[in-house]
Image (cartoon, helix red, strand yellow):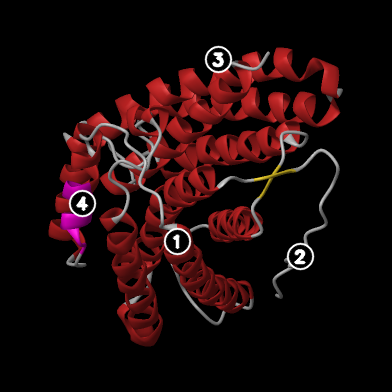
Amino acid sequence: MQSQINFNRKLDKEDYTLKEKDFIRLSLELNLFFGRIMKEHLIFMAITLPIKNSEYILEADTLKKSFEELLMEVLSISKGNLSKESLESDEFVTKYTLDAEKKVEKLYGICIDKELTKSTLELADNETNYSYNLEGYVYDLNSRIINLLMDVIKFKEKVIDEVLKCDLAIFIYPEMLEHILEEAKFYLKLLLDIQEKILSDKDILKREAFWNHIMEEHALFTRGLLDPSEEELIKTAHEFAKTFEELLKKTKEAEEGKACDISKENLKATEDMKDFNISATKGILACEIKSLINPLLADHLLRESNRYIRILKEFLRKC
């Protein structure tokens, strides 16, 4: 399996060049969100690989540590450089993240840098006061993250290839492995666009289609990882999967003039999904829900719905 990534981004007339302040802010916000998502993907892979495959576990853990180091660097320059909306969205961490990390460490024995989470929680206590003269440093930081991200993509592709050839066992659905690979490639594309200081509003429906697809699969994975006895939760997850399947189709077929209408539908569904994810995270942390879902995965899904909600609200303010 080879990565299909276009590194030659053409500038369209609808695109516009990012100013220094926006370049810094968007870079930091993207990396704080997706950098944590990537490191958690590596945690999930490491804790679900059989001990027989210790070299894969070690590689996942090494890549995870590299992301933790870069995330700490991102955090060190984030105070005062993030938008109020991103800080209030709970997309970087939630009030459940730290407890979820502690629980996963206790259950699986993997080491997680919890200082990252503590420092991220403290970001909300800082007023927005943009710092300048960081442009060159942030550009270099983005470049190093891109290089690491490409290594992560190669690792995920290698694992998927081995799993599909039945040469490697891992307790993650093959479709979920494809899902986390897709998210890594999406992160890479966004980061490459930011490096070129390109931003576009014209492809909002394409981005919403991507996130609807992600939400649909989250519901499907949740349905499949719940204990068979959790009939009501399974039914609810199934209904969410159907909802986002329909919204994905509508979003793909929608004309640009209907973007605001479809975005409102997407927002309502995602806010409902968020409520479901909050209940699931609380229930799994409290050991009140029987499932194969670890609490950090539950919180991970919640943060992704939070991110999508902020994207939708940001767009709808322009409607």
Residue 274 x/y as whole percent: 42, 25
| Mark sitting earlier along the chain (2/4) | 2
Circles 3 and 4: CB distance less than 8 Å?
no
Specify the label residue 268 is tagged with: 3
Task: Using the numbered discs, state the Cα–Cα distance from disc 1 to disc 2 in whole angstroms.
Answer: 22 Å
Q: SS for tag 3?
A: helix
Label 1: which secondary element: helix
Task: Tell me the residue at 65%/39% (across/down).
Answer: 213
Q: Residues within 10 Å of mark 3 (few under 14, many from 20)?
A: few
**Residue flagged by tag 4: what amino acid is it?**
Glu
Instruction: Rate crowding at label 1 as few (under 14), some (14 to 19) or many (20 or more) other CA atoms within 10 Å.
Output: many
Instruction: Give the mark nearest the N terminus, 4 or 1.
Output: 4
The amino acid beneath tag 1 is Val
The numbered mark at residue 101 is 4
Pointer 2 local density, CA inside 10 Å: few below 14, some 14–19, many at least 20 = few
Q: For mark 2, give the secondary structure.
A: loop
- Disc 4 is placed on an element classified as helix
Could you say which is closer to the camera, residue 107 or residue 200? 200
Which stretch did the figure color magenta?
Answer: 112-119
- CA–CA distance in space, label 1 to label 3: 35 Å
Q: Place residue 205 in its image quadrant.
A: top right
Q: Is residue 294 visible?
A: no
Residue 108 in the figure: left or right of residue 49:
left
Query: What is the crowding at mark 4: few (fewer than 14 residues within 10 Å), some, or many (at least 20)?
Result: many
Mark 2: amino acid: Asn
Q: Earlier in the sequence, mark 3 or mark 2?
A: 2
- Residue designated by label 1: 138
Disc assigned to residue 6: 2
Mark 2 to mark 4 CA distance (whole Å): 35 Å
Residue situated furthest bottom in the rendering: 55
Looking at this view, is 228 or 241 the one in front? 241
